[in-house]
Amino acid sequence: MAELREDEKIIQFTFGLNEPELEDEERLKISKKLLRELRNLDEVERADRTEDLNPEAGSKPGFATLMGTLTAQVSFNHILGFLSFLGDRLGDKPIKGSIAVGNNKVEFEVKSRQELAEFEKTALNLIAAMGGDENG
């Protein structure tokens, strides 16, 4: 089996707007538009609405999604481009989400474009630390 190169490592970002005053309809409208754009973005390997792992009783399995929350799979080499895209599209709106590398997951919350820019460095360090030593 070929050894995984750093640029082939897939990072999973799950995120959504963290504005409690947004109506569900507006949140859904924003996430649908963003999902279309993510699916056309070269930096994104795959993008979907986020499944609800704890759906309400009586929900149909496999059909429950988290309102306004998206999941994007991004290769390691494209993380900065992806975060820049989010900053351009969501501006100074608060974003809450998580980054997953394999079984490791870290949650994050940023409240402005400036915090997102600062988070880029932190994200790269977290991802490198969570990726561990792959030569072992």
Image (tube, rainbow, N blue to C red):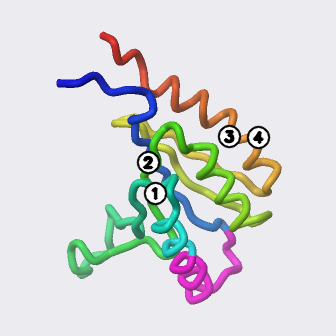
Q: CA distance from mark 2 to mark 3?
A: 15 Å
- Dots 2 and 4: beta carbons under 8 Å? no
Q: Amino acid at mark 1?
A: Ala
- Between the residue at mark 1 and the residue at mark 2, the CA separation in whole angstroms equals 6 Å
Please tell me how crowded label 4 is: few (under 14), some (14-19), or many (20+) other residues with Cα within 10 Å. Answer: few
Q: Residues within 10 Å of mark 2 (few under 14, many from 20)?
A: many
Name the image quarter holding residue 21: bottom right
Circle 3 packing at 10 Å, graded few (<14), some (14-19), many (20+), is some
| Residue in the picture at 45% in, 40% down | 105
What secondary structure prevails in the magenta region? helix
Question: Taking 81 as reference, is 125 above or below it?
Answer: above
Marks 3 and 1 sit apart, C-alpha to C-alpha, by 16 Å
State the image coordinates of residue 38 (x, y, percent, origin top left): 51, 66
Where are the magenta residues, as a range? 19-33
What residue appears at the point 50 percent right and 57 percent down from the top-left corner? 42
Q: Which mark, residue 72?
A: 1
Mark 3 and mark 4: span between their CA atoms? 5 Å
Quadrant of the rendering where the N terminus is positioned: top left
Secondary structure of residue under mark 4:
helix
Q: Which residue is mark 2?
A: 12
Reading the image, the residue beneath label 4 is 118
Q: Are marks 3 and 4 in contact (CB under 8 Å)?
A: yes
Q: Residue furthest front?
A: 42
Residue 31 in the magenta stretch? The answer is yes
Quickly name the residue at label 3: 120
Camera-side residue: 45 or 125? 45
- CB-based contact (under 8 Å), mark 1 and mark 2: yes
Q: Nearer the viewer, residue 135 or 132?
A: 135
